């Protein structure tokens, strides 16, 4: 195991289920983001399309008319993310990845670029997966801003979505996310994949999604990725389109600071 993997493995071994308040503020990495590096998603899409003419695959979906479901993945990128991306690519399915800043740095941009090339959406899942409601104002600000800065530096994309670790939020978190321009995306289908490392159980829970559902999963778990072929097959057979959070809400995008659990 690589040296950086030890603390990260300890940090994420329980996924988003176990609350572990931490009061300290990590030392920031030396990250500098120039305004010219931050581009709107539509601009990035044109650049990526020029690099790969068939990106994004298939037409964009109007979820006012189609049966849409948003598959979301937290805590990565990790060791199983690349295999998940291959599965989604073969299906032409899009998803939203709520990334942890430290994991992004450890990943060295590899999976993030693949996510963007395949039309997936990125969201902020904090710097080190702390319970945001337990932090000082400075610590809370750091957790969001540092992850924003790292992703912007690496990809040129400014994230407009976030998911609070453990789903733990309050008025202070709402205020800070509003200042940072981030909507709070929660979920209405919980697979409990962090607790039950069983591909069959994860699949059974995920396929209960209905139109407009937001499904919570974690791409750091092998069993979750093992469950994906069945999830994609069953929901496809039922006529669902796999969309990003922004596609799910369409012309009425999630507002900064507000909480969303489904469309």
Image (cartoon, rainbow, N blue to C red):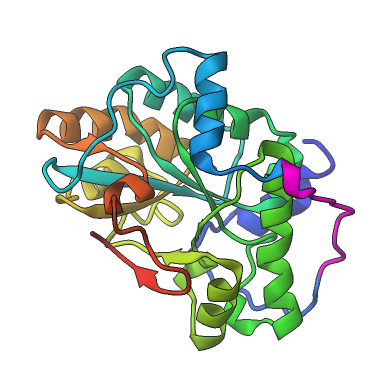
Q: Residue at (38%, 72%) from the top-left corner?
A: 259
**Residue 182 drawn above or below residue 172:** above
Residue 66 horizontal/vertical position (percent): 13, 40
Q: Residue 163 in the image: x percent, y percent?
A: 49, 62
Residue at figure coordinates x 45%, y 21% from the top left: 86
Residue 39 in the image, given as x and y percentages of width and height: 62, 42
Horizontally, residue 203 falls left or right of residue 256, namely left
Please give left or right for residue 211 compared with residue 192 in the image.
Answer: left
Above or below: residue 220 compared with residue 133: above
Residue 78: image quadrant is top right
Image quarter where the C terminus lies is: bottom left
Query: How would you classify the magenta stretch by its main secondary structure?
Result: loop
Q: Is residue 250 left or right of residue 114?
A: left
Is 30 in the magenta? yes
Residue 180 in view (yes/no): yes
Q: Is residue 136 visible?
A: no
Query: Taking 30 as reference, is 18 left or right?
Result: left
Q: Position of residue 74 (x, y in %)?
A: 50, 51
Q: Quadrant of the N terminus?
A: top right
| Residue beneath the point at 51% across and 57% down | 160
Quarter of the image for residue 214 reads bottom left
Measuring 79% from the left and 77% from the top, which residue is drawn there? 24
Circle count: 0
Looking at this rendering, what residue extends furthest in the top direction? 53
Question: What are the residue bounds of the magenta stretch?
Answer: 26-36
| Residue placed most toward the observer, 79 or 28 | 28
Check residue 59 for magenta coloring. Answer: no
């Amino acid at each position: 195991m690589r040296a950086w993997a030890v603390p990260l493995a300890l940090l994420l071994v329980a996924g988003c289920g176990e609350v572990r308040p931490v009061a300290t503020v990590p030392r920031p990495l030396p990250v500098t983001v120039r305004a010219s590096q931050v581009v709107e998603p539509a601009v990035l899409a044109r650049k990526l399309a020029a690099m790969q003419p068939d990106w994004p695959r298939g037409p964009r979906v109007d979820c006012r008319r189609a049966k849409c479901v948003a598959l979301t993945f937290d805590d990565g990128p990790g060791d199983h993310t690349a295999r998940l991306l291959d599965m989604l690519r073969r299906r032409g399915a899009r998803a939203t990845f709520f990334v942890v800043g430290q994991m992004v740095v450890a990943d060295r941009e590899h999976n993030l670029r693949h996510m963007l090339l395949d039309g997936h959406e990125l969201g902020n899942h904090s710097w080190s997966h702390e319970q945001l409601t337990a932090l000082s104002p400075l610590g809370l600000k750091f957790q969001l801003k540092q992850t924003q800065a790292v992703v912007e530096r690496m990809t040129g994309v400014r994230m407009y979505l976030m998911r609070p670790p453990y789903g733990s939020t309050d008025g202070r978190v709402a205020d800070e996310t509003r200042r940072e321009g981030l909507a709070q995306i929660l979920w209405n289908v919980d697979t409990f994949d962090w607790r039950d490392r069983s591909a069959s159980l994860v699949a059974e829970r995920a396929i209960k999604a209905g139109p407009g559902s937001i499904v919570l999963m974690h791409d750091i778990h092998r069993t979750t990725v093992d469950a994906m072929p069945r999830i994609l097959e069953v929901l496809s057979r039922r006529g669902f389109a796999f969309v990003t959070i922004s596609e799910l809400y369409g012309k009425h995008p999630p507002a900064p600071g507000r909480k969303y659990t489904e469309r």
